[in-house]
Image: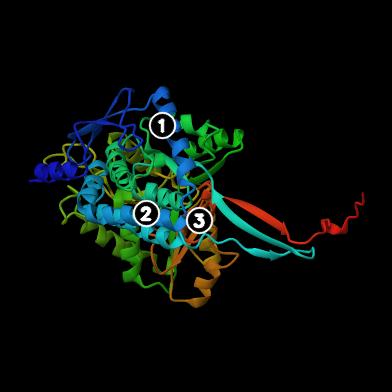
Amino acid sequence: AQDFEIQEALEKLGIKALNNGTSTGSNNFASGEELSSYSPVDGALIGKVRTTSKADYEKVMDAATSAFKIWRTKPAPQRGEIVRQFGDKLRELKEPLGKLVSYEMGKSYQEGLGEVQEMIDICDFAVGLSRQLHGLTMHSERPGHRMYEQYHPLGVVGIISAFNFPVAVWAWNTALAWISGDVCVWKPSEKTPLCGVACQNIAAAVFKENDLPEGISCLINGDYKVGEFMTHDKRVPLVSATGSIRMGKIVAQAVAARLGKSLLELGGNNAIIVTPDADIKMTVIGAVFGAVGTAGQRCTSTRRLIIHESIYDKVKDAVVTAYKQLRIGNPLDQKNHVGPLIDTDAVKMYQQALHKVVEEGGKLIVEGGVLQGAGYESGCYVKPAIAEANNTYEIVQHETFAPVLYLLKYSGDVENAINIQNGVVQGLSSAIMTNNLREAEHFLSTQGSDCGIANVNIGTSGAEIGGAFGGEKETGGGRESGSDAWKIYMRRQTNTINYTTELPLAQGIKFDL
Ligand code: UN1
């Protein structure tokens, strides 16, 4: 039954056995080698894409740069109308796309649907925004002069995205870039190339129906070497990259070397502080979803629980009891909570983390382990694990993309917990569970969490698209999605207009001829 369902979903999304992974819309071409996509759900080959060669990339850039010349002349609200149509298509295809996300990436079907919903939400947001790309007007110091600022399209935006959110992160970027008047070239993760093909097919159909140039949305495929075509390319003024800190440092340096802009959304090492005034029931739900949702492969996943000593045993017992209820298995089967990791390399990293935490002196209180036997043939299913640890352990300082949760104990005031929470190189998401106003406000104050996201009485993951998304320190400093994140996709211009017959100089400078 699952095979039939997947086949039906692939058909609806226009995915074939061999896909051209390089596309500028209806024009699908590619001459690179083949890349196979295997499902972590059952190990089956889903399909193949051809990767993008340097010559293919040049064709893509030609299409993108010429499309930009047309797209930038369309009024922003008309660009918004195109994004509205794209959002409507996503509504129609929510189920098949959610299914493909679940099958190719391994997250639960509910989370796959949630990811498509994030795409729809950002489209709605972008449509409204297309009439609100506001600049300011200023009072000139010179008589009869007017000053204002305006935002113009930037050009070709390069998007490099990760396997864990194979469609939503692209949509956050592309929906804002499109209404801004930019065109996009996207390199999805080589682990989820078919999600990329599916999205490109949807976008290409919308542009075609509206008689718009196909290069507004372009797709390239392959490993980091294909990403490097963009990071080194002066024709790409902005590169938005999501992934590991290691990758982000390489991208940032390459883009900075040519003085381009980069938007980085890198690793997190997210913690929930649990104070003596926490609601334990809410804490357990927030912590468990945060730690095991997407099998611990969100950049916002909860990795550390920082618990006050006075309630430590109570919280620990409640979380351990909740872990006993977790059902691990095929993510398309809605009774399961946890699906597989992305591949067997990820399984190895998970095993190494468990080994390392014990080696450093930690104690596994929920053992973990790799599942074998019927239903687990892909070798990618692991049991979520919990270890009692210390924040100074090297492994605790490191982001392991797997369901491994570290319990850390604090004593005394909430400052001590905040010091632990901030005592890592990453700065993406953070949360505090407390009904104590003083503690909550302290956590949100200048002396509080140093992360891009700081929540009270909700977990670390599952941010809404309306807020700016991203983090500080080695998370890379970028902000995507809501609020005024759109500004990075545009160039700002300050204009001064003189409507007199005199030419006074600013700063009162006299220059008589
Ligand atoms: C990511 O893991 O890269 O906040 C993005 C969340 C999701 C997005 C995560 N809305 O968990």
What amino acid does circle 1 point to? Val
Q: Residues within 10 Å of mark 2 (few under 14, many from 20)?
A: many
Judge: label 3 CB < 8 Å from ligand 1: no
**Cβ(mark 2) to ligand 1 < 8 Å?**
no
Question: Disc 3 on helix, strand or loop?
Answer: helix
Task: List the residue tagged with mark 1.
Answer: 60
**Residue 485: mark:** 3
Q: Residues within 10 Å of mark 1 (few under 14, many from 20)?
A: many
Q: Is residue 61 above or below residue 243?
A: above
Q: Secondary structure at mark 1?
A: helix
Tag in front: 3 or 2: 2
Q: In the displayed structure, would residue 306 be above or below residue 108?
A: below
Disc on the earlier residue, 3 or 1:
1
For residue 242, say whether it is visible. no
Which three-letter amino acid code belongs to the residue tagged 3? Ala
Label for residue 83? 2
Q: What is the total number of numbered labels drawn onto the structure image?
A: 3
In the rendering, at what x and y percent does residue 8 appear?
Answer: 13, 44
Q: CA distance from mark 3 to mark 1?
A: 26 Å
Circle on res. 476: none
Q: Amino acid at mark 2?
A: Val
